[in-house]
Amino acid sequence: GQQLNQSPQSMFIQEGEDVSMNCTSSSIFNTWLWYKQDPGEGPVLLIALYKAGELTSNGRLTAQFGITRKDSFLNISASIPSDVGIYFCAGLGYGGSQGNLIFGKGTKLSVKP
Amino acid sequence: GAGVSQSPSNKVTEKGKDVELRCDPISGHTALYWYRQSLGQGLEFLIYFQGNSAPDKSGLPSDRFSAERTGGSVSTLTIQRTQQEDSAVYLCASSLGGTPAYEQYFGPGTRLTVT
């Protein structure tokens, strides 16, 4: 079945640093979504991408839908402490149920000790 | 509130008992989804409702799992004869549905612990 490989699995950030994470797949996806989940809460939608090559920003967040439709990345610029959490990519593939998003396993952002 | 709400927020049950989890979607959203999130894992799709169409049940892990959506709004996920491996956070999401927008908005989840 379709799978998303999200990396890195975890990373530590220092305030002010830029952060980058990505998702790749062997399958084509026609929609990419990026979510953030805080402890004890449901994921919150950050950015939605619908066209190959699309680059979309939401404040300090920038995400791109890869040209091949098989990957996407999320960048966070000038990170702040509240950026800590788990970030998930999700894709909607071709041919599947219209509601069936495939999720990556998440990238956990923590603060450097 | 305007968001997706779920109840209960936490549920502890004994192995073998049945449980019901409730989801109230965002008003006006025609699509409703259930996911399961095990500790440290991504979200696993369970079932999807769109309007009056037959639900997509392809993600339900066994016949102990079922869900219904009454009146195109509130949904209940039922797990019969619960097992310890059913312990997880069950998340509900809703969206406007249709193409091309599949932006799903999630509730806070129900944490289910089977002892």
Image: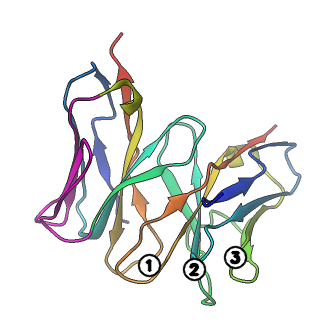
Residue B97 percent across, percent down from the top left: 48, 79
User: Which chain does the numbered disc 2 sit on?
Assistant: B
Q: Which mark sits nearer the N-terminus, 2 or 3?
A: 2
Residue A65 percent across, percent down from the top left: 19, 61
User: Is residue A80 shown above or below B25?
Assistant: above
Nearer to the camera, A83 or B78: A83
Secondary structure, mark 1, is: loop
Q: Choose top left, top right, bottom left or bottom right for residue B113.
A: top right
Which residue in the protein does label 3 denote?
B73
**Mark 3 closeness class: few <14, some 14–19, many ≥20 residues within 10 Å:** many
- B32 falls in the magenta region: no
- Establish whether labels 2 and 3 are both on one chain: yes
- A71 falls in the magenta region: yes
Residue B30's label in the rendered image is 2
Which three-letter amino acid code belongs to the residue tagged 2?
A: Thr
Which residue in the protein does label 1 denote?
A98
Image quadrant in which the N terminus of chain B is located: bottom right
Q: Which residues are magenta?
A: A50-79
- Count of numbered circles on the image: 3
Q: CA distance from mark 2 to mark 1?
A: 13 Å
Which three-letter amino acid code belongs to the residue tagged 1?
A: Gln
**Mark 1 closeness class: few <14, some 14–19, many ≥20 residues within 10 Å:** some
Residue lying at the far top of the rendered structure? A113
Q: CA distance from mark 2 to mark 3?
A: 8 Å
User: Is residue A2 shown above or below B88?
Assistant: below
Nearer to the camera, B59 or A61: A61
User: Which chain does the numbered disc 3 sit on?
Assistant: B
